[in-house]
Amino acid sequence: CLQSEDFSTTWAATDVTVTANDTTSPDGTNSADKLNDTNGAAQGNVTQSVTIANDSTWHTFSVYVAKYVQTDHFPEFRLALTGGTSIYSYLQLNTSTGASTTRTFNGEVYSNVYDAGAGFWRIAISVKNNTSGNTTAALTIYPAMASSLGGAPDVAETGYIHTWGAQLENLPLVSSYI
């Protein structure tokens, strides 16, 4: 079951410390979680996998990310459909300006960053499955992927972000938070 507001439960953390309910979320409650990559020797992340149908429908991963003025590290978000001919889509975010860059492998994708108000961005990555046997959707968040927007992954990068409201929908575009 996708835990959308608590990254300390069914999300697997690798080299990331999760602090649940660390700050105010877009809905005004104290439920946004801090994801802190403090290991300068590994690429820290949180990930959660869910089972999907082997079909040709779209899947959209979205999550709210707090706006920050620092530009010393840039988080990255990934939606991967795996099990057959895998499809990967990555979105790297400047948490200060909302600017983003994307990388995609093997498929039809769409991504965007929205100003969600209340000091948060909402990122969305949509990927169309390809009927090749992909039956797993893996959602991954890297709090500190690179030292510059669009930069190569750098294991030495450390830093934190605040996240809230992750969801995976069987739709081609993001909808209202459920």
Image: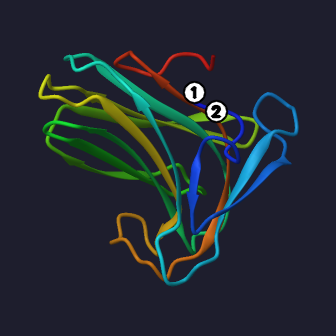
Colour scheme shown: rainbow
Up the image or down, 119 lies above or below 152; here it is: above
**Callout 2 environment at 10 Å: few (<14), some (14 to 19), or many (20+)?**
some
Q: Could you tell me which residue is drawn at 19 percent across and 41 percent down?
A: 86
Residue 55 vertical placement versus 74 (above, below): above
Image coordinates of residue 45 in percent, x first then y, are: 52, 59
| Residue indicated by mark 1 | 1
Report if the CB atoms under discs 2 and 1 are less than 8 Å apart: yes
Residue 34 picture quarter: bottom right
For the N terminus, the image quarter is: top right
Q: In the rendered structure, which amino acid carries the disc numbered 2?
A: Gln
Q: CA distance from mark 2 to mark 1?
A: 6 Å
> Quadrant of the rendered structure where residue 53 is?
top left
Q: Secondary structure at mark 1?
A: loop
Which residue is depicted at the point 22% across and 20% down? 54
Residue 96 in percent (x, y) is at 60, 57
| Frontmost residue, 96 versus 75 | 75
41 relative to 166 in the view: left or right: left
Nearer to the camera, 41 or 119: 41
Rendered image: mark on residue 3? 2
Q: Looking at the image, which residue is at 63% across and 16% down?
A: 178
How packed mark 1 is, by other alpha carbons closer than 10 Å (few <14, some 14-19, many 20 or more), is: few
Q: Which amino acid is tagged 1?
A: Cys
Give me the disc on residue 10: none
